[in-house]
Image (spheres, rainbow, N blue to C red):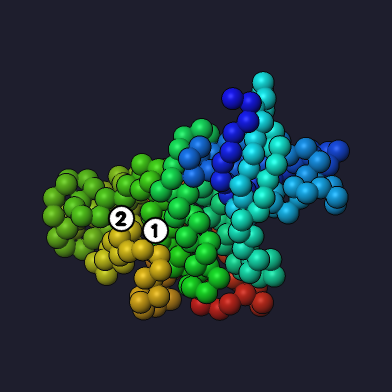
Amino acid sequence: MKLYKTEALVLRTRDCGRGDKLLTLYSRKLGKFKVMAHGAARASSRKRGAVQLFTRANFLIHRGRELDSVSQCEGVEMFSYLRGDLEKISYASYLFELVDVLTPEGEPGEPLYLLLLTTLRLMETEDLELLARAFEIKAADYAGYHPILENCANCQGSLDGPLGFSPGLGGILCGVCGGSGPDALPCSRGLVEFLKVLRRWHPSRLRQLKVDSRTRIQLKHLLHEYLKYHLEQEFKSTAFLDRLKSSPAGTPGTHV
């Protein structure tokens, strides 16, 4: 068929000149794919509002020989609360960058799509930092990078003694194996329980958690090191968030 419909989030945009935009979309049914939105950057374009970053929209797309193009589109959710809040925009940018890196093109990923959509909706009023941590561990699971939290990632034994965490070995280390590997990080039992809760709970329940600043820093460090190891890259948006948090205008005591 020459035309097909899909609901999608606008994951990334790039101006291509002459008012055209190259969009990276993340669809509930089709996964990640690229389309051209001709003329969408022009002030007079009817497509303009629906092709903005962070927008959920319904698309009618024309199949092309090399690249499909947007025939029609209509915005469904614009997440307007993001527009005037630099911190929230920065967190949303990080989530979108993470999804972009985690997902290959053309592979359906409905659970991750729904997680991203749910997290975006909750970001208006909930704890941005805990939402980001929960998103990280759940997204890693959906992408096949399951952190091992129930037994030792090295010897598969029970979690006895002082614990560690190894991104390279894939998760928690028991007291005997706690120093194994050059990347082993300290990890308390309390931290392990927080990781399990972040993985298991629906994001809307995170408001029930009382997490002190030290634990937040540790959770951030473990998950970032884990993702960095398995995805083999740093994230531009996390570096920006760190600078934002360390600036006088940032919110003290919180981290990416």
Residue 239 seen in the figure: no
Give the percent coordinates (x, y) of residue 30: 50, 37
| Category of crowding for the residue at label 1, using alpha-carbon neighbours closer than 10 angstroms: few (below 14), some (14–19), many (at least 20) | many
User: Which residue is situated farthest in the top direction here?
Assistant: 65
In the rendered image of this protein, does residue 87 appear above or below residue 7?
Answer: below
The Cα atoms of the two marked residues, 1 and 2, are separated by 8 Å
Q: Is residue 54 left or right of residue 193?
A: right
Using the image as rendered, state which of residue 2 and residue 202 is in the foreground.
Answer: 2
Q: Secondary structure at mark 2?
A: strand
| Residue lying at 25% horizontally and 55% vertically, measured from the top left | 149
Q: Quadrant of residue 13?
A: top right
Give amino acid for label 2: Phe
Residue 37 seen in the figure: yes
Give the percent coordinates (x, y) of residue 79: 62, 63
| Residue lying at 60% horizontally and 43% vertically, measured from the top left | 25
Give the percent coordinates (x, y) of residue 101: 52, 43
- Reading the image, the residue beneath label 1 is 222
Give amino acid for label 1: Leu
Total numbered badges shown on the rendered structure: 2
| Residue lying at 47% horizontally and 49% vertically, measured from the top left | 113
- Reading the image, the residue beneath label 2 is 165
